[in-house]
Each structure stands twice: as structure tokens, then as C-alpha cells.
Image (cartoon, grey):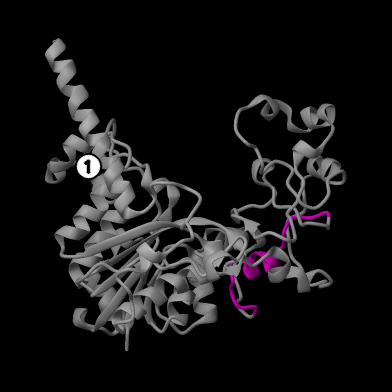
Amino acid sequence: MYNTISLFSGAMGLDLGIEKAGFNIRVCVEMDKWAAETIRRNTNIPVIEKDLNLVPTTEILDVAGLKSEDVTLVVGGPPCQAFSTAGKQRGLADFRGNVIIQYLRVINDVRPPYFILENVRGLLSAKLNAVPEEYAEYECVKDVKGSVIHFVTNEFKKLGYSISYALLNAANYGVPEKRERIIIIGHLGGRVPIPSPTHSEKGQYGTSHWITLRDAIGDLLDSDDQHYVPLRPKSIEYMKLLKEGQNWRSLPPDVAERAMGKAYKLSGGKTGFLRRLNWDEPSPTLVTSPTMPATLLCHPTLLRPLSIEEYARIQQFPDNWKFEGNIETVYKQIGNAVPVGLGYAAGKQVMNDILGKTDENEEINNRVNYSRYLNATDNQAEKMFEKSVKSKILNYGKINNED
């Protein structure tokens, strides 16, 4: 019951949350060798270890043992590739082979009652740089900020889906990590409301407080069974001088300049440089390598980066979940994963809609911001996009008149 197809499954962070919400994952499509091996080691779910471009929908259904009408939900987080055809001989083929186009293809073929699409924040501002002839209607929005998500959601709407989406901070949904991800929910029916946050920084408006790093990994502090890539020698020199919650800005000015090198005079917050984490806050977004100079994730008190065991806890994988591959590959799998709690929030909202438990006034009554960014829900983003398109049309007219 509630049969689900998982695309771009990775190490199954999103899928574990979906399963927790009551759905039954029947097949995973994942081209990465080590992520596919991780799925096989931990589950009995059949895995199609191929690029989705090369997998016909009939194969997905056959491996799952399903017919289209048996599928309730399709989930997945396709990588946010550039939608560009300019300057490439293979341009049109590259556009059509974009993984989001392939996600659309599967939805069109299966037509499940619901789908969930997860993506990075950059999807909100991504531009269509060029369009093939079959998508000529989007020529007028080419090079407009936000045109990719407009294209994607509009194509879903053509298939009959109502669309809701928002940039959600995982910490607001019980994850010990401040991680911003777009969640798009489609329904062959009425619009599914964006799930309301269950947590907030200070526990305001009846929500729980954010879950902290100490809550998530504090009990691992005395564990000797930790695996990690050592800090770089240059990083060690400076990390010895920093305390919990500090970064390069806490160093004496002359030491900070020496430590940062050319990056010292660059603009931007640079908060990821030489960073020790804070026990009493959620983790920053986990990256695919915790020892890189600009995105260092150093333990609050120990002279090492977060271990893969701590990574897995923060992303809410079960302690008995085993990751395949070498340590760098495992960091990548966990760092790329959707936090289990965020997957559960999205899945639970869809399940509530199936069971008739969603409230059409849920978003109106919500008092906790979904994320720290403005104009990051479907209603807000579409209004901003329409304004940008009108501005482009007006400017185009002015240029032509001048000619």
C-alpha cells in the first residue's frame, strides 16, 4: 500500500523519512556505485544502478513489480544542472537529457497522485539560458532569474498537478542541522499546503526548540569508534587557538590574516573558514568534505573534523545504517543526503493529505518562517518572477524603440 518510486535515491536519507511517514519504497534508481551498494547492504529494495536518462519508465515499473495505477508517490532529488544549450554542439540533447526533464518524464509516464521533488536553494534563482524548439514558449523568459523553477512547475501543471513549494530549513523540522532545501509537492488534485515547522530557534509559538549538536552527538564524545579524515596540518596550527563556536575572526588580526592568506581580503562572511562548531546550536549544513579550508567542520572541543558517525547522526540515519565505500565516499554520501527528518516532514504532509487531514489554512496560520530567505515559497517566488518578466519585456520595448 502507498507504493513509492524513488529516483536519485543516494544513500536514502529522503527515502527513510518517506518510509517513516508510512510509504512503501518499491524501487530505487541510483547511478552512483557506492550509494547503490549502501542501499543494497541496508535494505531488500531493488536498485536500478543506471543514469535515469538510460532507464525507460517501463523498466522502473517492472523492477518494482508495479503498474502505473499502483503507484501513489514518486520522490527524488535530481541534481540542479544548468539548463543551457548555448555554445554546445550537443546543446539540445544536453537540455533534453537534464535530469529534471527526466524526472518530469517519469511523472508524465506514471502519473502518480503525488510526487515530491527535493532540490538545492539555487533552483529558485537558476536561469534558462536557452530552450529547444519544443519549449519555444519559454523563450520570452530566457535569462530571467527564476525561470528554471517556473519552467519546471509550469510543466508539472500542464500534466494536471497542483504545485506547492518552499525553501525549508531542516532545523525547523526537528533536524539538528541548519540546512536549506527546496521541497516541491505535486498533487493530481487540490494544492497540498506547505508543512508547518515543528521547531524554531527559541521554541516560539508553541513549537519545540531547535535540536542542538549536543543533543545529536553528545553521547559520542567518549566513543573511540570514530572514523574521520584528519585535519590539514595548516588548519591544526590555528584550530588549537580557537574555542567552541569560534572561527578565524576570533584570531588576533595578524594571525587571522596569515591564516586566511588571499581569502582574508575577499568579500563575504567567510564564516566557514577555520570553524569550530557550537554544542548548543544545530550543525551548519554538512558538506561533502569537512576538512576543506572554506567549509571546515571542526568538532566543538576535539582537534578533528566531524566523524562519519557524527555526520550520520546529524543527518538522522539510524546508527545501524552501514555506508559502503572509502571514508571520502561515505562523507560524500551523507553530505549529499536529504536529512531524514526533512523527508519525514514532506512525506507526512502528503500522507495527511491522503487521509484528509491537511488544513487549507495551515500556511495562513503558520507564524514561524520556513527559512531565513524571503520570497522562497511558490506564491512569493511566482510574484517576483512575474515582476522580473514584465521588467524584461518593458526594457526590451525601450531598446527597440531607441533603435
136 in relation to 152, above or below: above
Amino acid on which disc 1 is placed: Leu
**114 in magenta:** no
Q: Position of residue 83 (x, y in %)?
A: 30, 43
Q: Is residue 395 left or right of residue 212?
A: left
- Who's the residue at 22% across and 64% down the image? 162
Q: Position of residue 179 (x, y in %)?
A: 54, 57
- Who's the residue at 23% across and 75% down the image? 113
**307 in magenta:** yes
Label 1 element class: helix
Q: Is residue 310 left or right of residue 304?
A: left
Q: Residue 2 versus residue 86: which sits nearer the camera?
A: 2
135 in relation to 335, above or below: above
Specify the quadrant that holds the N terminus: bottom left
Q: Residue 148 versus residue 193: which sits nearer the camera?
A: 193
Using the rendered view, name the quadrant where residue 54 is placed. bottom left
Q: Residue 292 versus residue 364: which sits nearer the camera?
A: 364
Q: Is residue 403 left or right of residue 289?
A: left
Q: Position of residue 221 (x, y in %)?
A: 81, 69
Q: Residue 209 versus residue 45: which sits nearer the camera?
A: 209
The residue stretch that appears in magenta: 303-319
Q: Which residue is mark 1?
A: 92
